[in-house]
Image: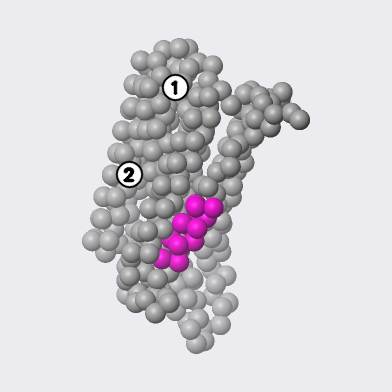
Amino acid sequence: MADAHAKPQHDYHLVDPSPWPLVGSFSACVMFIGAVVWMKGLFGLEAGTKWMFFVGLAGVLFTMFSWWSDVVKESRKGDHTPVVGIGLRYGMVLFIASEVMFFVSFFWMFFDMAIFNESRAIIPEVGNWMDTAAAWKTWPPTGVELLDPWSLPLMNTVILLLSGTTLTWAHHAIIAGDRKAAKMGLLITVLLGLLFTGVQAYEYYHILHGHLFFSEDAAQAKLYGSIFFMTTGFHGFHVAVGTIFLAVCLLRLQAGQMSPQKHFGLEAAAWYWHFVDVVWLFLFVFMYVVFG
């Protein structure tokens, strides 16, 4: 009888049994139920109860750290053969494609509001539809004060475009075997990512405390504010995730875990970051400038 644990005679990696899919799914379920409890209340718990959400969030973060640590260990053991590397690349491409469709849904909603607003006048202005119909007749909604696109939004655009160049520098440096330049490029990119998040946080503070996106008609303010915060907020979340992604790559590079021949972690992070850059360009052009 052949030894079940003998070295496989193929280039594919058969992963060991892992608890993280189950733990991650359970934690995500607790987190989202906790979000509902926090906002609306559930199971006899009052709205505002936060502990369930943060317990679930802690479980999700722990799962992410542990699962990705296992993947790094597999890579260092040599399990990521050229064939496995192709699968990893296909997986990253499909993941980014799913993210593209995620943002397409938000842009679809925004363009539907901004381009076809005049057709909303046909909505019967009866009952609960009256405020909504009135808000949808103009874009931006009448009385809503918008941001100046040539101040903080332009600053963040420059920051992200610059971060894309420094990341490309780091990528080409690791390919050329220049570890010092790769570290410097990655460090600058991480700092620019943090700067972008800080500027966006200040922008949100300015909006909320400067009473932008508010008007005498609450329906108008909610209409514009909801699509703005959903789209820019989720993009900001992606920037934060990308910054962590790049910071981990920087730590791995510092520890000598990447080489000119083997650095897919950095390559995947670069794909993700450039995707985030492109999404922001669409956000800036259409949400801040053209329809602002």
State whether residue 47 appears in this view: yes
Q: Which residue is mark 2?
A: 197
Q: Which mark is residue 222?
A: none
Circle 2 SS class: helix
Residue pictured at 56% horizontal, 23% vertical: 78
Residue pictured at 33% horizontal, 64% vertical: 51
Q: Residue furthest right?
A: 1
Where is residue 87 shown, x and y percent of the image?
64, 33
Where is residue 79 shown, x and y percent of the image?
58, 26
Q: The C terminus lies in which quarter of the figure?
A: bottom left
Q: Mark 2, residues whose alpha carbon is within 10 Å: few (<14), some, or many (≥20)?
A: some
Q: Residue furthest left?
A: 209
Q: Which mark is residue 257?
A: 1
Residue pictured at 45% horizontal, 12% vertical: 177
Tell me which amino acid carries mark 2.
Thr
Q: Mark 1, residues whose alpha carbon is within 10 Å: few (<14), some, or many (≥20)?
A: some
Magenta segment main secondary structure = helix
Circle 1 SS class: loop
Residue 44 appears in which quarter of the rendering? bottom left
Indicate which label's residue lies in the foreground, 1 or 2. Answer: 1
Q: Are marks 1 and 2 in contact (CB under 8 Å)?
A: no
Is 286 located above or below residue 14 in the figure? Answer: below
Q: Which of 21/237 is in front? A: 21
Residue 41 appears in which quarter of the rendering? bottom left
Distance CA(mark 1)–CA(mark 2): 28 Å
Q: Which of 116/104 is in front? A: 104
Is 225 located above or below residue 263 in the figure? Answer: below
Residue stretch rendered in magenta on the structure: 22-34
Is 264 situated left or right of 65 in this image? Answer: right
Tell me which amino acid carries mark 1.
Gln
In the rendered structure, which disc, 1 or 2, sits on the residue that comes first in sequence?
Answer: 2
Residue pictured at 32% horizontal, 48% vertical: 200
